[in-house]
Image (cartoon, helix red, strand yellow):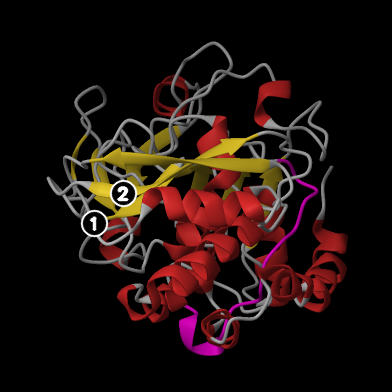
Amino acid sequence: SLKGRRVGLITNHTGLSRTGATAIDLLHKAPGVTLVALFSPEHGIRGILDATVPSSVDETTDLPIHSLYGETRRPTDAMLRGIDTLVIDLQDIGARFYTYTTTMAYVLEEAAKRQLRVVILDRPNPINGFAIEGPALDQEEIGFTGYMREMPIRHGMTLGELARLFNAERKIGADLQVVAMRGWRREAWYDATRLTWVNPSPNMRNLIQATVYPGIGAFEGANLSVGRGTDTPFEQIGAPWIDGPALADALNARRIPGVSFYPVRFTPVSSKFAKEECQGVFIMVLDRAAIRPVRVGVEIAAALTKLHGAAFEIDRAARLFGSRRDLGRIKAGEDPARIAAGWAGAEARWRRIRAKYLLY
């Protein structure tokens, strides 16, 4: 389907075939296909950067690598010169605020303006394509970490399905083709695919971290370490002002489905609270079928509010968590289970919206 096309490829180190060949090499060598330029999302073409990504040149192909996480987050006229088709091959993680989703949406928008074709090589949702959880997004928080207001934190879709949904629901009108996977089932977690795990970003190192990420990442904007700069990001949270044993006791007393907690001390070598000792908790996933990770995040936030009051700057979590109303309910001491139950309407609306765009 790419024969005779002049292609711009949006990819990174996750763009691999089953044999381990890169999408870059495969398209560069493909007969009848002209690979014109490469585009990198957040974390860069090799997925190792945790800062702004500079544009550069690919050492293997000598092609330009245009950064979509630098001076611009959208492809420009200059970047798109000589291209008639944009191919996207990225591994998403299944959470609203993971930025590859919005990068894909911005590519669709810019392609539609210029009548360019977009082809998405679809990949699994690692934390399954069935479970949906979390509040919808406040209008004022729409942006690079949340593209669409109706989208809950755990969206239960693949990147290709999301592209179909955005293209129609946001009336983008791009010439879109999704190359669907063969053999993937909605209820499948990544370990059922027999595909090799490749870290989609530097701090997403295993499926356990991906499982809790929708809830732990949702509160990363607050004055908490989520374990960046340690060996186990997203599996632990902490801060210098937290009483770890008291927090573990409070959370375990809640009997939250699918998880348990134990107190830890850690000192991040980078990121938030770098070189400061933090106390906090380590999150044990006991039953991933039972866990509701966004509720776990709310339970942790509620326990921190109760134990530490104003020391926990919860309002700073608004951009990623998405609902200022629910942050207010946490601060007011409402039961986290009741707050989570209040998402049912938004979750049901999302299920209705997404139904016509599902491919599997």
| Residue found 67% across the figure and 23% down from its top | 191
Residue 265 rendering spot, x and y as whole percentages: 30, 40
Which residue position holds label 1?
A: 240
Badge 1 marks a residue whose secondary structure is loop
Q: Is residue 131 above or below residue 62?
A: below
**Quadrant holding the C terminus:** top right
| Residue found 56% across the figure and 87% down from its top | 332
- The residue nearer to you, when weighing 165 against 245, is 245
Badge 2 marks a residue whose secondary structure is strand
Q: Is residue 68 left or right of residue 214?
A: left
Q: Say what amino acid the circle numbered 1 marks.
A: Pro
Q: Is residue 226 above or below residue 289?
A: below
Residue 291 rendering spot, x and y as whole percentages: 71, 46
Which residue position holds label 2?
A: 279
Looking at the image, the residue that sits furthest to the top is 19
**Which quadrant of the view contains residue 189?**
top right
- Measure the alpha-carbon separation of dots 1 and 2: 6 Å
Residue 234 rendering spot, x and y as whole percentages: 44, 44
Q: Are marks 1 and 2 in contact (CB under 8 Å)?
A: yes
| Residue found 36% across the figure and 69% down from its top | 222
- The residue nearer to you, when weighing 137 against 329, is 329
Q: Is residue 261 left or right of residue 351?
A: left
Residue 358 visible: yes
Q: Say what amino acid the circle numbered 2 marks.
A: Gln
**Which quadrant of the view contains residue 344?**
bottom right
Q: Is residue 206 above or below residue 217?
A: above
Residue 106 rendering spot, x and y as whole percentages: 47, 66
Q: Earlier in the sequence, mark 1 or mark 2?
A: 1
**Which residues are the magenta region?**
128-142
